[in-house]
Amino acid sequence: MFYWLLKYVLLGPILWTFWPTKVIGRENIPEAGGAILASNHLAVVDSFFLPARIRRRVYFLAKKEYFTDKGLKGRFKRWFMLSTGQHPVDRSGGSASRAALDTGVRLLREGKLLGVYPEGTRSPDGRLYKGKTGVARMALEAKVPIIPVAMIGTEKVNPIGSRMWWPRRIEIRIGKPLDFSRYYGLAGDPFIERSMTDELMYALMELSGQEYVDVYAATVKGLTQSSGVGSSAGAPRAAESRQREQSEPVRQG
């Protein structure tokens, strides 16, 4: 109940007034049944504007840190996240990652519309980065389509490092569903899941017009923060170099 009150009475009208948004391809979202909305990720506000402009309720898998703050502010934040369809997941890897995938698959099998950011984190510089294969695994296990979504202009509304939301025009481009039914029964095959993910990222690149970088965004952020890379532009090259070094065979002699 609170979700719809927030969407149509409390928050939605404010978003529609100060951030006029053009939506292209709304008809590509099925009226019922499980499906994955796989979006590029430019800003925190993506998770507000996308569900605000879609008729169906959208569920997201949110990092558990959003639910663990202490005090009154933390309790309010936790209540708000749960009330708006956010489900806490542990992104530390291993069994925690499997639990997150299980949560996503359960929601999809229940006929929910699941919002996912295949890059795994916000783009550090506005470019589109390599997708993680979890989205493919969920689509195969739940047997649902993946719908590519491109958010345009949200990085100008809420630039990285800024707490302000600046009035700007936004565009949401929703692509045609990607049907991977030919791969059903092959969940867990790393080559199949990588192929599906790459196909999705290509669709997102075409929809968004972003430059694609074949490196994980989290890797770029880590290099920028920990190894003294001076700018985000140089980080992908450093990441690519490190990946090449790690993938080269060990030579004797």
Image (cartoon, helix red, strand yellow):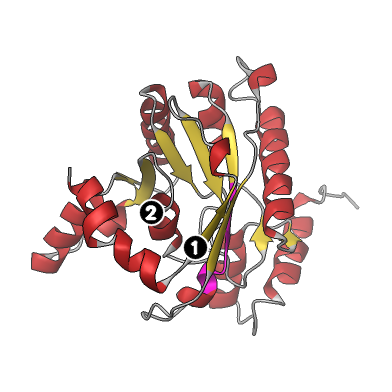
Q: Position of residue 133 (x, y in %)?
A: 60, 39
Residue occupying image coordinates x 71% and y 68%: 236
- Magenta span contains residue 150: yes
Vertical position of residue 3 compared to residue 121: above or below: above
Vertical position of residue 74 compared to residue 102: above or below: below
| Res 21 label | 1
Q: Position of residue 243 (x, y in %)?
A: 73, 57
Q: Residue furthest right?
A: 253
Question: Which amino acid is tagged 2?
Answer: Ala
Q: Residue furthest top?
A: 185
Residue occupying image coordinates x 37% and y 81%: 164
Toward the viewer: 244 or 87?
87
Work out how far the residue at label 1 is from the one at label 2, CA to CA, in angstroms. Answer: 10 Å
Q: Quadrant of the N terminus?
A: top left
Badge 2 crowding class, 10 Å Cα cut-off, few under 14, some 14 to 19, many 20 or more, is many
In this rendering, position of residue 148 left or right of residue 34: right
Q: Position of residue 239 (x, y in %)?
A: 70, 65
> Which segment did they paint magenta?
149-155
Q: Residue furthest left?
A: 72
Residue 133 visible somewhere in the drawing: no
Question: Which amino acid is tagged 1?
Answer: Thr
The image quadrant that residue 209 belongs to is bottom right
Q: Do tag 1 and tag 2 residues touch (Cβ < 8 Å)?
A: yes
- Magenta span contains residue 82: no
- Circle 2: element type: helix
Residue occupying image coordinates x 31% and y 63%: 13
In this rendering, position of residue 115 left or right of residue 177: left
In this rendering, position of residue 246 left or right of residue 145: right
- Circle 1: element type: strand
Badge 1 or badge 2: first in the primary sequence: 1
| Res 52 label | 2
Residue 231 visible somewhere in the drawing: yes
